[in-house]
């Protein structure tokens, strides 16, 4: 069996990609399809935060029509949508893979490392007790971190730009 040979035909309009070759033993023309093409993966936004929606697109093409796309977002979630919307539960760096398959089963692959930033925590004052100058003041807050856990809460009671109280359970004097 001889190795495959590459041949190009010149036509008046320019070069044409080879489609196949004639088999000398059986005198049959064997035509092969070119593999699909897949250009870069584009996330929108390009640097998302955890829990934010990210729209993924990739330009897939094939000489015989539009190939199917399969997405692997790198967090054990996948999609077969052409332009999927995905949310990452946690911050981190994820390997996003897009694979396209044409009608003949030929594939093309693109990869992208996507950095997902930390989602900011939220703090909501739920109650203020004893807000008088001569009496202690109690501030009750609900603090949440959508993609992690709250390490501590800080208060700047005298508005000097520096925290006066830091911790999860604290008393400010």
Image (cartoon, rainbow, N blue to C red):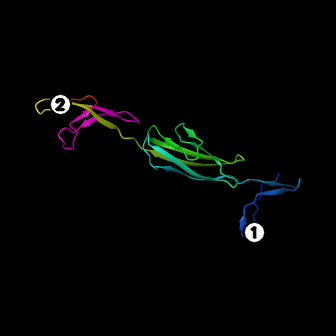
Question: In the visual, does 136 lie left or right of 116?
Answer: left
Question: In the visual, does 89 lie left or right of 139?
Answer: right
Residue 172 in the image: state x and y as whole percent.
19, 32
Helix, strand or loop status at disc 2: loop
**How far apart are labels 1 and 2 at the CA level?**
87 Å
Q: Residue at x 72, y 70 (%)?
A: 13
Instruction: Determine which quarter of the picture holds residue 135.
Output: top left
Image: 79 above or below 130? below
Question: In the visual, does 46 lie left or right of 5?
Answer: left
Crowding around mark 2 (Cα neighbors within 10 Å: few <14, some 14 to 19, many 20+) is some
Nearest-to-viewer mark from 1 and 2: 2
Q: Is residue 49 or residue 6 the one in the foreground?
A: 49
- The quadrant the C terminus occupies is top left
Specify the label residue 19 is tagged with: none
Q: Main secondary structure of the magenta part?
A: loop
Residue 20 in the image: state x and y as whole percent.
78, 56
Q: Residue at x 54, y 37 (%)?
A: 77
Specify the label residue 137 is tagged with: 2
Instruction: Determine which quarter of the picture holds residue 137.
Output: top left
Image: 105 above or below 27? above
Residue 27 in the image: state x and y as whole percent.
88, 55
Q: Which residue is mark 1?
A: 11
Q: Which residues are magenta?
A: 141-166
Q: How many marks?
A: 2
């Amino acid at each position: 069996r001889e190795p495959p040979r590459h041949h190009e035909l010149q036509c008046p309009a320019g070069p044409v990609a080879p489609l196949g070759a004639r088999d000398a033993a059986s005198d049959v023309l064997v035509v092969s399809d070119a593999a699909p093409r897949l250009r870069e993966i584009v996330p929108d936004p390009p640097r998302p935060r955890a829990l934010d929606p990210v729209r993924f697109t990739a330009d897939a093409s094939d000489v015989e029509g539009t190939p199917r796309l399969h997405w692997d977002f790198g967090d054990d979630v996948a999609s077969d949508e052409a332009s999927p919307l995905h949310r990452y539960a946690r911050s981190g760096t994820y390997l996003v893979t897009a694979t396209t398959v044409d009608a003949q089963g030929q594939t093309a692959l693109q990869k992208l490392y996507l950095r997902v930033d930390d989602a900011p925590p939220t703090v909501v004052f739920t109650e203020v007790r004893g807000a008088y100058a001569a009496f202690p003041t109690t501030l009750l807050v609900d603090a949440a971190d959508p993609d992690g856990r709250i390490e501590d809460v800080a208060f700047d009671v005298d508005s000097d730009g520096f925290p006066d109280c830091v911790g999860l359970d604290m008393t400010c004097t």
